[in-house]
Image (tube, helix red, strand yellow):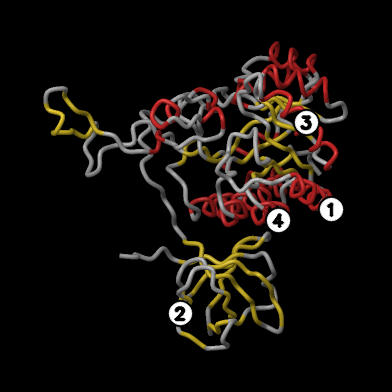
């Protein structure tokens, strides 16, 4: 069995957390209620952190807590206190970007591993060694490195400190995610966890004396998202990533729902395991690779590219809007007596051919009947988001699976 890197998954709330663990993540990362760069995610209070750590450890996974704001002096004592509470709650490591916070936490909280965030822009082995001397055990590399540079760093460091890199998800338009655009335009700083994502907005060009006549920067009905980066997808290059010397392959997405997390984690988990079992067979089996790559097209995403791994990303940004080949229909809350109790997400009908997203892969599921849990009424459609309904189900469907179906025009 070939050794492969850790698969690290995001968890913006309890349901994405349980999904990530069930679908095969080796480790999960999430934020507390403060000091993280995703303030708008659900995040966890310290009681929730403790429960999440216990849940992850029971599943054989590790837990990393993000404390990756760029800290002011007033933040440092609270960050150290939060890191200490996280250690006592069972967290395995904290992810920190600020140089002073790294030093403060490493000194004040012995026994807690420190991982250096990608926002620290680590691009060389000398910098990694500096962080190691400060007490860090892992560096999340800058997203601007090529795969060849990562491989050279791993060879140079020879295991002195672990290296981690993002392999899938949204990419920031700013260097290593250190963006001032949101702060400048809305007063909400990305570097303090409050990004409003103005890079995803659409823009047009105006001439000073003709302000009432905006012109698209490129030809298009609604202007262009010239600052919006493509999403990263390295599924087709997993063998080289697995052999690169990286200790961890990281999926972005703490603002994403459980369907996104389960789909991406499941696809990468199955692919990594297939490569570990039989490297030559995996490389030869184009059908397997194509099937898992197709899974990633079914979630909401922007156009994919390979980031900086093989040179410059797709030219000019412009990843306006999202692509999505399937829609989230329902979450399976429970299964018993040949029926599934599901929480409706988007409208579906009796007679629909849906797909169940499971840790083993997706499988077809035909909706033969819909019965409202609260009233027992049989209906032709599930129409109310959040409503609990029962549908007949096969014996392989399990609690925590999710249903998806065709994207419908809601006009």
Distance, label 1 to label 2, CA atoms, is 38 Å
Foreground pick, 173 / 238: 173
Spot occupied by residue 367 in the image (x, y as percentages of width and height) = 53, 79
SS assignment at label 3:
helix
Distance, label 3 to label 4, CA atoms, is 27 Å
Residue 58 is tagged as: 1
Taking the view exactly as shown, the residue that stands out farthest to the front is 74
Foreground pick, 278 / 256: 256
- Front label number (3 vs 1): 3
Spot occupied by residue 402 in the image (x, y as percentages of width and height) = 60, 65
Q: State left or right for residue 302 relative to residue 191.
A: left
Spot occupied by residue 375 in the image (x, y as percentages of width and height) = 56, 86
Work out whether mark 3 precedes mark 2 in sequence or the reverse, and give the earlier one: 3
When asked about the image quadrant of residue 31, the answer is top right
- Whether tag 2 and tag 4 are in contact, CB under 8 A, the answer is no
Distance, label 1 to label 4, CA atoms, is 11 Å
When asked about the image quadrant of residue 162, the answer is top right
Work out whether mark 2 precedes mark 4 in sequence or the reverse, and give the earlier one: 4
Taking the view exactly as shown, the residue that stands out farthest to the bottom is 377
- Tell me the residue that label 4 is attached to: 18
Distance, label 2 to label 4, CA atoms, is 28 Å
SS assignment at label 2:
strand
- Tell me the residue that label 3 is attached to: 81
Distance, label 3 to label 2, CA atoms, is 51 Å
- Tell me the residue that label 2 is attached to: 381
Work out whether mark 3 precedes mark 1 in sequence or the reverse, and give the earlier one: 1
The vertical placement of 267 against 354, above or below, is above
The vertical placement of 331 against 225, above or below, is below
Q: Where the N terminus falls, by quadrant?
A: top right
When asked about the image quadrant of residue 254, the answer is top right
Q: Residues within 10 Å of mark 2 (few under 14, many from 20)?
A: some
């Amino acid at each position: 069995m070939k050794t492969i890197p850790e698969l690290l998954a995001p968890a913006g709330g309890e349901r994405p957390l349980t999904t990530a663990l069930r679908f095969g993540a080796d480790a999960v990362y999430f934020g507390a209620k403060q000091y993280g760069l995703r303030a708008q995610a659900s995040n966890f209070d310290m009681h929730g952190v403790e429960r999440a750590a216990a849940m992850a450890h029971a599943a054989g996974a590790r837990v990393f807590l993000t404390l990756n704001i760029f800290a002011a002096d007033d933040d440092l004592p609270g960050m150290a206190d939060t890191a200490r509470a996280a250690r006592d709650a069972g967290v395995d490591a904290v992810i920190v970007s600020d140089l002073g916070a790294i030093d403060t936490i490493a000194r004040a909280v012995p026994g807690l591993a420190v991982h250096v965030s990608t926002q620290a822009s680590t691009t060389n082995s000398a910098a990694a060694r500096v962080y190691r001397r400060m007490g860090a055990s892992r560096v999340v590399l800058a997203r601007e490195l090529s795969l060849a540079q990562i491989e050279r760093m791993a060879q140079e460091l020879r295991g002195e400190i672990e290296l981690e890199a993002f392999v899938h998800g949204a990419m920031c338009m700013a260097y290593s995610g250190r963006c001032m655009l949101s702060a400048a335009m809305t007063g909400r700083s990305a570097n303090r966890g409050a990004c409003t994502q103005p890079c995803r907005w659409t823009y047009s060009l105006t001439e000073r004396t003709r302000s009432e006549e905006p012109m698209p920067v490129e030809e298009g009905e609604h202007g262009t998202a010239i600052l919006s980066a493509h999403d990263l997808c390295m599924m087709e290059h997993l063998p080289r990533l697995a052999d690169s010397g990286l200790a961890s392959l990281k999926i972005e997405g703490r603002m994403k729902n459980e369907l996104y997390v389960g789909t991406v984690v499941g696809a990468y988990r199955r692919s990594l395991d297939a490569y570990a079992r039989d490297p030559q067979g995996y490389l030869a089996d184009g059908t397997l690779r194509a099937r898992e790559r197709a899974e990633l097209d079914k979630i909401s995403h922007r156009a994919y590219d390979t980031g900086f791994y093989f040179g410059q990303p797709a030219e000019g940004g412009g990843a306006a809007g999202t692509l999505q080949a399937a829609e989230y229909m329902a979450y399976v809350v429970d299964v018993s007596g040949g029926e599934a109790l599901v929480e409706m997400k988007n409208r579906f009908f009796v007679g629909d051919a849906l797909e169940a997203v499971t840790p083993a892969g997706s499988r077809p599921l035909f909706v033969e009947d819909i019965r409202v849990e609260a009233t027992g009424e049989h209906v032709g459609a599930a129409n109310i988001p959040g409503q609990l309904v029962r549908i007949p189900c096969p014996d392989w469907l399990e609690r925590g699976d999710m249903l998806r179906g065709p994207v419908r025009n809601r006009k």
